[in-house]
Amino acid sequence: MFRIGFGYDVHALVEDRKLILGGVEIPHSSGLKGHSDADVLIHAIMDALVGALGLGDIGRHFPDTDPAYKDISSLSMLETVAGLVEKEGYALNNLDCTLVAQAPKIAPFLPEMNGNLSKSLKTDVNRINIKATTSEGLGFCGNREGMEAFAVVSLIKKDGDIKSVA
Ligand code: MG
């Protein structure tokens, strides 16, 4: 009836790339390197969703060798993954995720990110929780070499009879 998925992703920070997080372009001196728009938060979320469905990882669904995904918006990939969730007969119960970034300040952008995610996932904003933290200056996030993100999702079978589980 319920399925849990966990996702993790990391991307390097480089100059001359836009910084896109949760589908929001955030003004910053550097951006994340990647084949797509490198939205590390959405990548972790997609891996959690695909994982909950038992369908491998996003590399399997969106190969980074495929030119079709070059610089693609991760929000559009998230919509495709939401379609997979639907196709498998599940609905999102809730999503919780954490972005680790030393800079810039992410908090002002969280409501817009939440709105973007809920739109792509066709769900209520209150089913989605996004957290952002620094790593207190430690490690590759702390020294601004990159950013990482973690996500946990729970899915519920749409035609499931919860009572039968008890
Ligand atoms: Mg990635």
Image (cartoon, rainbow, N blue to C red):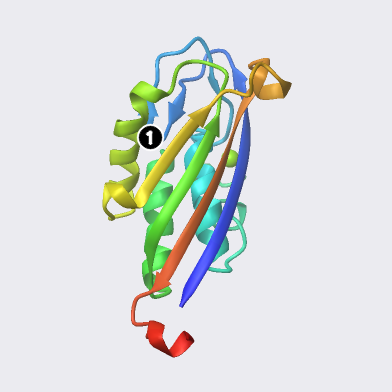
Residue 152 visible in the displayed image: yes
> Farthest bottom residue?
164
Q: Nearer the viewer, residue 128 or 82?
A: 128
Q: How many marks?
A: 1
Left/right of residue 3 with respect to residue 56 in the rendered view: left
| Residue assigned mark 1 | 23
Q: Which quadrant of the figure has residue 56?
A: bottom right
What residue is drawn where x is 35% and y is 26%?
109
Query: Relative to 51, is 116 above or below?
Result: above
Query: Relative to 74, is 90 above or below?
Result: below
Q: Position of residue 106 (x, y in %)?
A: 43, 23
What residue is drawn where x is 58% and y is 32%?
34
Going by the numbered disc 1, the residue's amino acid type is: Gly
What residue is drawn where x is 52% and y is 38%?
98
What residue is drawn where x is 53% and y is 27%?
133
Left/right of residue 38 with respect to residue 72 in the rendered view: right
Q: Nearer the viewer, residue 61 or 161?
A: 161
Q: Position of residue 92 (x, y in %)?
A: 38, 61
Left/right of residue 143 with respect to residue 133 in the rendered view: right
Which quadrant of the picture is home to ligand 1? top right
